[in-house]
Image (cartoon, helix red, strand yellow):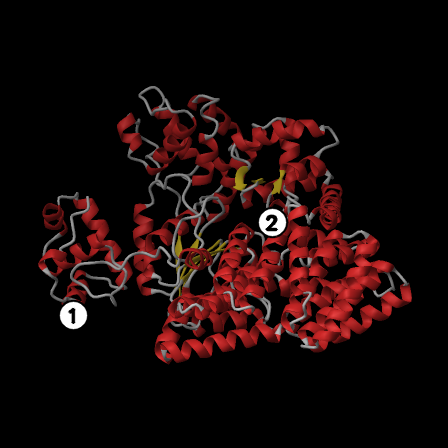
């Protein structure tokens, strides 16, 4: 999905038009003015998510801290709900406290809207989360979608009905049919696929009856529309007659509507070829979509040749069974949840489910096996994106391995290999949990266990848990010596160096890392050689070892030789740190910005936080104190989101503290606090933009009759508020501003939502209380 260019939040941009639902949208917005928790309920395919997203876009300016979508469809256990919300709002998971407690503390002073989508399969956990967060955060609002209410005190429940359909007993003219929202939706979607499609006197009756037969369910209507470029409306209607025979004998209860949706999916399934049907069922094994190569490997065989997969996927995309999603540089294919569940039922019936689960597991095992050698090269961005988007499936494959006694060792190796590749994405706590489980299940001495101990040692040290780190180092070292394995011995030496570095024992760290570097070089492992060189460059820089610049240069040379952009960014950060330490803030700034540009597409929050810190220190040393303070705040938030502990390296903490002391002296406590607060509120992209260009692009403060501390009304809304104060009706406002009455009504509705009001009198009272004289030259221009 493409993402909106917005200050805060993660709402995806609308890719298709929103049709109808005016009454439901208005009712929901009014409910949101009175309730902090609104749950949209209804059967699958009824349009709960689409209505929720429409509402979220309409009200987003009323929430200074953003509107955040939490997609729960891929969450398979209740315990993961709080972690899913934390990930959505870009909060790291480094705290040892329960995730829900940490999340409640984080949101305590935030004014934001959480959109919890698809709660029904984790209902109890969603209810508990909503109750605790609403109690802890007085300015928080939650908009949820679920097949049933959450059952939380204070919850307002709004059932989402089917779209209105034309009455069944009257012949329909094209004009009368077009007044129906269901017909409008069908026509709009059909026109998108076939531009010359239109509701005519010839087909209006058939189109009307299609919408009636589909009970006005949006997903069913859209699936029907997908076939109108191929079949005539009369042919579609004929097939619906065949498929919906059970519906004529069923009730109009919620359960019957679910049967209607299943009938629609049955019908769509029957319109697929036998091979498309088989692929639909087999691809349902992926929890959150997949790439073409994964589908080719896992789903081919037993009647489907590997080279046929691409054409079959294209057919399923055309039939709206699969959606194509672009995540540069990857393309992924994904099923809506309801269609995926239907496919999984068909897979179970086919008898192929066990084979597909094994194939899915083996695909991800093979993927991770290649990761160790493929990571350090030009494909780093592709691999990073693949791992980030495949988290749900990677967890599923890990769980499959660790649940099967003969595959536990594979799961152990998989967890150990994966841990560092999503280092900056805030998954440290999840990685540690998987390693804990794998190590507990496989206690036999092995090189894989040695690697897992090494990986977990890195994790706990990055989280600032030095005590656990030392214990893991001792076990890792003892096992490596017992095995006598050269790679295990190199890993133990590197971990010893890391532990000493983070304990501020620099001479010991340098000695251990020198040892590890020699071992890795002898083994011909460039990835590990690079990471150890990087650690040596850091340790020598902090220790004022004369070899620091040489190690930094070697680190950069290695990463550039292997064309590894993320690794190159890490090397550039080391060089920036060295130049800052040498009293060269301008060179440090140039290098850190270069590193930042490389890191941006990776969403490397930990690496970006490190860059922002160096840029803040350099700005402070260069006399740009306000800029430095804002960067400190932005870095502070990113450290938190990354899941790592800034205190892990005491030298970095010292640099941060010294910078803050300088800024406190030059700016004063209040100005420093305000500037740091500005930085904390920046989104990731805003922080990067500010660091690179010295400014962000927030929404401008509205000009006109109201001061800067008013809610974020647009210029036009300020004009409308002023006219409401004068007692003008919507019709009179429209005439005054030369806009339509409907547009004027929309502006008034927006103002009510943003200000949390329910009446025009409240707008007038608020406007009167906030009005300040405006210069004659400051009157805002008319905006059509």
**Residue 348 position (above or below residue 445):** above
Can residue 152 be seen from the camera position used here?
A: no
**Seen in the image, is 160 located left or right of residue 533?**
left
Mark number displayed over residue 227: none
**Residue 86 position (above or below residue 667):** above
Residue for badge 2? 565
User: Dot 1: what SS?
Assistant: helix
**Residue 670 position (above or below residue 153):** below
Mark number displayed over residue 769: 1
Comparing 750 with 1, the one in front is 1
**Seen in the image, is 515 located left or right of residue 221?**
right
Q: Are marks 2 and 1 in contact (CB under 8 Å)?
A: no
Give the x, y percent position of residue 141. Answer: 39, 64
**Seen in the image, is 65 located left or right of residue 351?**
left
User: Dot 2: what SS?
Assistant: helix
In which quadrant of the rendered view does residue 208 lie?
top left
**Quadrant of the frame with the C terminus:** top left
Question: Depth-wise, is mark 2 or mark 1 nearer the camera?
Answer: 2
Give the x, y percent position of residue 590. Answer: 49, 57
């Amino acid at each position: 999905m493409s993402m909106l260019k917005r200050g805060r939040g993660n709402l995806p941009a609308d890719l298709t038009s929103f049709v109808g639902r005016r009454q439901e949208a208005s009712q929901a917005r009014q409910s949101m003015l009175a309730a902090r928790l609104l749950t949209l309920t209804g059967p699958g395919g009824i349009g709960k998510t689409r209505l929720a997203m429409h509402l979220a876009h309409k009200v987003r300016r009323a929430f200074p801290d953003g509107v955040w979508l939490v997609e729960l469809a891929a969450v398979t256990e209740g315990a993961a709900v709080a972690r899913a919300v934390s990930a959505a709002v870009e909060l790291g998971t480094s705290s040892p406290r329960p995730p829900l407690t940490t999340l409640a503390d984080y949101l305590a002073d935030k004014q934001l809207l959480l959109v919890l989508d698809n709660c029904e399969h984790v209902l109890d956990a969603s209810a508990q989360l909503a109750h605790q967060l609403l109690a802890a955060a007085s300015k928080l609002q939650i908009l949820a979608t679920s097949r049933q209410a959450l059952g939380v005190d204070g919850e307002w429940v709004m059932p989402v009905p089917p779209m209105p359909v034309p009455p069944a007993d009257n012949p329909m003219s094209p004009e009368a049919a077009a007044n129906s929202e269901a017909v409008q939706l069908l026509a709009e979607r059909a026109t998108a696929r076939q531009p010359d499609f239109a509701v005519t006197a010839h087909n209006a009756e058939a189109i009307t009856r299609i919408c009636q037969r589909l009970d006005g369910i949006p997903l069913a209507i859209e699936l029907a529309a997908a076939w109108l470029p191929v079949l005539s409306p009369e042919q579609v209607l004929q097939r619906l007659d065949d498929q919906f025979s059970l519906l004529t004998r069923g009730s109009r209860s919620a359960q019957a509507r679910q049967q209607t949706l299943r009938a629609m999916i049955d019908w769509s399934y029957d319109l697929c070829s036998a091979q498309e049907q088989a692929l639909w069922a087999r691809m349902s094994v992926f929890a959150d979509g997949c790439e073409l190569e994964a589908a080719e490997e896992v789903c081919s065989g037993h009647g489907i040749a590997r080279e046929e997969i691409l054409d079959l996927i294209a057919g399923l995309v055309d039939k709206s069974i699969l959606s194509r999603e672009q995540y540069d540089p990857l393309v992924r294919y994904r099923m809506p949840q309801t269609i995926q569940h239907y496919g999984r039922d068909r897979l179970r019936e086919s008898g192929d489910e066990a084979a597909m689960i094994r194939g899915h597991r083996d695909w991800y095992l093979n993927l991770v096996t290649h990761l160790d050698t493929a990571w350090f090269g030009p494909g780093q961005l592709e691999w990073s994106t693949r791992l980030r988007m495949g988290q749900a499936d990677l967890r599923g494959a890990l769980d499959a391995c660790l649940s099967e006694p003969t595959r536990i060792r594979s799961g152990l190796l998989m967890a150990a290999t994966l841990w560092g590749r999503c280092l900056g994405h805030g998954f440290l706590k999840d990685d540690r949990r998987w390693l804990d489980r794998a190590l507990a299940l496989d206690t036999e001495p092995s090189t894989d266990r040695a690697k897992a101990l090494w990986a977990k040692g890195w994790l706990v040290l990055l989280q600032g848990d030095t005590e656990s780190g030392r214990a893991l180092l001792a076990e890792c070292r003892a096992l490596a010596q017992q095995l006598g394995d050269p790679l295990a011995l190199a890993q133990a030496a590197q971990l010893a160096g890391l532990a000493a570095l983070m304990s501020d024992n620099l001479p010991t760290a340098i000695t251990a890392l020198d040892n590890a570097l020699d071992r890795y070089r002898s083994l011909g492992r460039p990835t590990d050689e690079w990471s150890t060189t990087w650690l040596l460059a850091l340790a020598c820089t902090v220790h004022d070892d004369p070899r620091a610049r040489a190690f930094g240069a070697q680190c950069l040379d290695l990463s550039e030789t292997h064309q590894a952009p993320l690794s190159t960014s890490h090397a550039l950060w080391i060089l920036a740190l060295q130049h800052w330490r040498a009293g060269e803030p301008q060179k440090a700034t140039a290098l850190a910005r270069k590193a930042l540009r490389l890191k941006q597409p990776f969403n490397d929050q930990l690496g970006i936080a490190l860059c922002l810190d160096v840029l803040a220190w350099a700005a402070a040393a260069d006399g740009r104190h306000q800029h430095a303070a804002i960067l400190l705040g932005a870095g502070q938030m990113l450290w938190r989101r990354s899941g790592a502990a800034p205190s892990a390296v005491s030298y970095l903490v010292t640099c941060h503290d010294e910078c803050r002391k300088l800024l406190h002296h030059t700016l004063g406590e209040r100005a420093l606090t305000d500037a740091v607060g500005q930085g904390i509120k920046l989104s990731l992209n805003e922080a990067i933009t500010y660091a690179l260009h010295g400014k962000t692009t927030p929404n401008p403060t509205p000009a006109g009759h109201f001061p800067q501390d008013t809610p974020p009304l647009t210029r036009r809304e300020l004009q409308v508020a002023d006219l409401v104060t004068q007692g003008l009706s919507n019709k009179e406002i429209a005439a005054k501003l030369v806009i339509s009455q409907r547009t004027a009504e929309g502006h008034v509705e927006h103002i009510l939502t943003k200000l949390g009001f329910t009446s025009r009198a409240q707008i007038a009272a608020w406007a009167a209380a906030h009005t300040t004289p405006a210069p004659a030259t400051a009157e805002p221009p008319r905006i059509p």
